[in-house]
């Protein structure tokens, strides 16, 4: 009986590791987007959307906005 439980526990552990890894690799294949100002590639999660454009940082978003306002 205990042997059966031990096998069941190891199967559960393998499943946990397998699915945990699968989830993590999905995060790594995060979509990359290009900064509209400095052309640096950042993940969609990190990117900042401003005025229909995408930027790598708040600094770029602000600079681009200032640039646009000047025109
Ligand atoms: Zn940038």
Image (cartoon, helix red, strand yellow):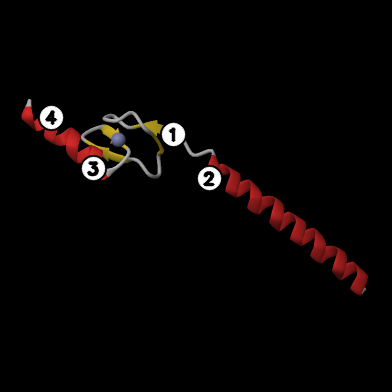
C-alpha span from label 1 to label 3: 19 Å
Pick whichever of labels 4 and 2 is earlier in the sequence: 2
Q: Residue at 26% of width from left, 30% of height from top?
A: 37
What residue is shown with label 4?
68
Pick whichever of labels 3 and 4 is earlier in the sequence: 3
Pick whichever of labels 3 and 2 is earlier in the sequence: 2
Can you say whether 36 is above or below 24 in the image? above
C-alpha span from label 4 to label 2: 34 Å
C-alpha span from label 4 to label 1: 24 Å
What residue is shown with label 2?
27
Q: Where in the figure is residue 7, as x and y percent of width and height? A: 87, 64
Q: Residues within 10 Å of mark 1 (few under 14, many from 20)?
A: some
What residue is shown with label 1?
32
- Does label 3 point to a residue whose CB lies under 8 Å from ligand 1? yes
Q: Residue at 18% of width from left, 40% of height from top?
A: 62
User: Quick check: 17 left or right of 42?
Assistant: right
């Amino acid at each position: 009986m205990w042997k059966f439980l031990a096998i069941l526990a190891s199967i559960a552990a393998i499943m946990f590791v397998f699915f945990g890894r699968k989830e993590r690799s999905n995060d790594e294949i995060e979509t990359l987007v290009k900064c509209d100002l400095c052309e640096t590639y950042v993940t969609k999660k990190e990117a900042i959307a401003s005025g229909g454009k995408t930027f790598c940082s708040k600094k770029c978003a602000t600079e681009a906005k200032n640039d646009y306002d000047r025109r």
